[in-house]
Image: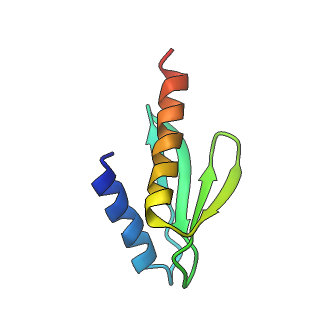
Amino acid sequence: MSDESLITTLKTLCEFNNVQITQTFSSKSKQVAKVRCLENTNTFEITNLTNNTVTLIDNLEETAEAIQLLMNETFAITSF
């Protein structure tokens, strides 16, 4: 997923943060992370589906970087 598409997706999540929308990100057909924007905030909740950890990030660009990192790590692990 391109950085621009990812940023657009994250912005959309926050535009509709008054409803519960969760975006799932996959790498190599494996679900990597679920992301949502917490209600009435611009805080992103990232759930790492590999180890079930949850991270909260208040910055759009940092959130995109974290998602890309998770997707790249999963790609590296599954491509051996």
Residue at (55, 49) in percent of width and height: 33
Q: Is residue 54 above or below residue 29?
A: below
Residue at (41, 65) in percent of width and height: 10
Residue at (70, 41) in percent of width and height: 51
Q: Is residue 14 above or below residue 23?
A: below
Figure label count = 0
Point out the image quarter for the N terminus: top left
Q: In this view, does 63 lie above or below 11?
A: above
Residue 7 is situated, as x and y percent measured from the top left of the image, at 35, 61
Q: In the shown orientation, is residue 11 left or right of residue 51? A: left
In the image, 25 versus 11, the foreground residue is 11
What colouring style does the render use?
rainbow
Q: Is residue 34 above or below residue 20?
A: above
In the image, 56 versus 32, the foreground residue is 56
Q: In the shown orientation, is residue 47 left or right of residue 37? A: right
Residue at (52, 50) in percent of width and height: 66
Residue 36 is situated, as x and y percent measured from the top left of the image, at 53, 66
Residue 65 is situated, as x and y percent measured from the top left of the image, at 46, 50
Residue 12 is situated, as x and y percent measured from the top left of the image, at 37, 71
